[in-house]
Image (spheres, rainbow, N blue to C red):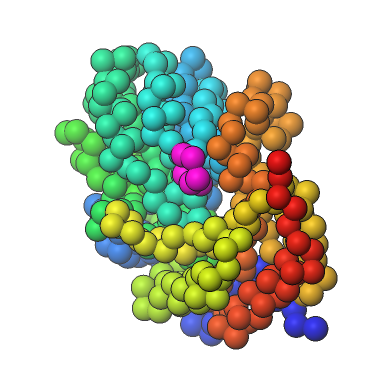
Amino acid sequence: MKKIDFSPPDITNEEINEVVDTLKSGWLTTGPKTKKFEKNLAKFCGVEKAIGISSATMALEMVLRLFDIGEGDEVITTAYTYTASASAIAHVGAKPILVDVKKGEFNIDPQKIAEKINSKTKAIIPVDVAGIPVDYDEIYKAIEDKKELFMPKKDTMQETLGRILLLSDSAHSVGAKYKGKMIGSVADFSVFSFHAVKNINMAEGGAILFNNIGDIESAKIYRKLQMLSLHGQTKDAFSKNELGGWRYSIDFLGYKCNMTDLNASLGLIQLERYKNGLLQKRKTIFKRYIDNLKNESQFILPILENENMESSCHLFLLRIKSIDENKRDQIIDEMSKKGIATNVHYIPLPMHPAYKNLGYNIIDFPNTYEMYENEISLPIYTKLRLEEVDYICEVLSNILKEYPCVVKN
C-alpha cells in the first residue's frame, strides 16, 4: 500500500549547507542572515520593509501593540481560521469580533465586516485562507465608509493612520497576488508564516511587511518593531557585538520574539527555491487535481486564479456536495486506511471551547459551518509526484462509489 503524507518538508542539501555555515559562523541568533532574508523578502513582495519574527502569531501581536490596541478595543476577524488570527487579539487585551465568510467561499465577508464596525473598532484582520487573497478593495471600502466612527487614541500610530488598521493574516499567501500586486504589499501591514508546513519552511518563523504609514517612514516603523520584539532594547545582539557597541538601554517593557539566523538560513534558500520553482510546482500539482476531479459532479473545486487574484496554492480545499460532517469524517478515515493523509482546514473558531467561552456559537455563522462540514484538504506539497496526485484522486473517487453520499433533506 502506498503511503502519502499530508505535508512533509522539502529540504535539500542547499538548506543543510546554509544551516551548517551558520553553525560554523559563530552567529546563531538575529544577525546578518536574518537581515539579508528580510531584505530579500521585502524585495520579492514589493515593499519597503520586512522584519523577521519568531512566528506569525507573534507578528500579528506585535503590529497590534505597535498601534496601541488593547483593553476596550475591538478587532474584527473571521470565524473561519486557525486560532492564531484571533488569539493575538486576545493577547493584547482587545476583544475579537468574529464574522462569517461569504456564501460559498472560505474568506471573510466584507459586508459582515461593515456591519460590525463601531467606535471601538481599531483593526481588521482578514485571512487569506489556503492562499486565496481576500477582497481587499471591498474591505478598504468598508473601512472608508465607516471612517467617521473611528476614534483613535491620542499620540499613537492609530491617530497617524487616521482610520481602522488593515492587518492581513497572510500566513498562507506568500507568493499570491491581488489585482496584480504581490500579497504583502496590499494591506497596511501583512504577516507571513514560515512554519514547517507553510510554502516557505523555516521550521518556525514569521514576518511583518509594510511601507510608510502617513509621515512615519518605514525605517522608523522597523526600528520600533525591532524593539518591541526584543525587550524594548535599543540594540539587537548583532549591533551590541560590534567593537565598542556594548552600551544599550531598555526604552519600554517589550517582548522576546525575534527571528534567529538559524531560521533565516533556511529562509534564504527556501525563498530562492520558491521564486525559482517551488511555487510553480505547487501550481502544477493544484492544476493536476483540477484536471482529475473537474468532471465529477459531486466535487466543488477550489480556484487557482481569476481576474482579481492568483493563489499561492498553500492548501487544496476540496468540498463534496451533499455530505455532512459525519460523512466527511468517514471519508477521511477511509482515505487513511488507504495510506493517504488528509486534513480539514479549519474547525471554525466558534466550535472550540475557548471561543464558546467567549460567547460565540457556530449557529450564528451559517456560511462558515456550511464550508466546513463537507471540506477535505488533500495533500499538496512540492515533493508530491503527479502520479501520486492521480492515485489520491482515484482512491477518493472509488471511496465515494463504495460509500455513496446520502443527500440531506
- Residue 307 position within the rendered picture, expressed as x and y whole percent measured from the top left: 28, 57
Q: Position of residue 244 (x, y in %)?
A: 35, 53
Q: Main secondary structure of the magenta part?
A: loop
Could you tell me residue 86's position as x and y percent?
Answer: 55, 35
- Placement of 368 over or under 357, stated as above or below: below
Observer able to see residue 183: yes
Range covered by the magenta-colored residues: 102-107
**Residue 292 magenta-drawn?**
no
- Residue 372 or 384: which is nearer the viewer? 372
Which of the two residues, 272 or 147, is positioned nearer the viewer here?
Answer: 147
Q: Residue at x 80, y 83 (%)?
A: 1
In the image, what residue occupies the spot 27% across and 62% down? Answer: 43
Instruction: Tell which residue pokes out farthest to the front in this image.
Output: 409
- Residue under the image location 51 percent in, 30 percent down: 99
Instruction: Tell me where residue 46 sits by quadrant.
Output: bottom left
* Residue 137 shown left or right of residue 117 in the figure: left
Residue 379 lies in quadrant: bottom right
Q: Is 105 colored magenta in this rendering?
A: yes
273 sits to left or right of 329 = left
Farthest residue to the right: give it: 337
Horizontal arrangement in the rendering, residue 70 relative to residue 331 (left or right): left
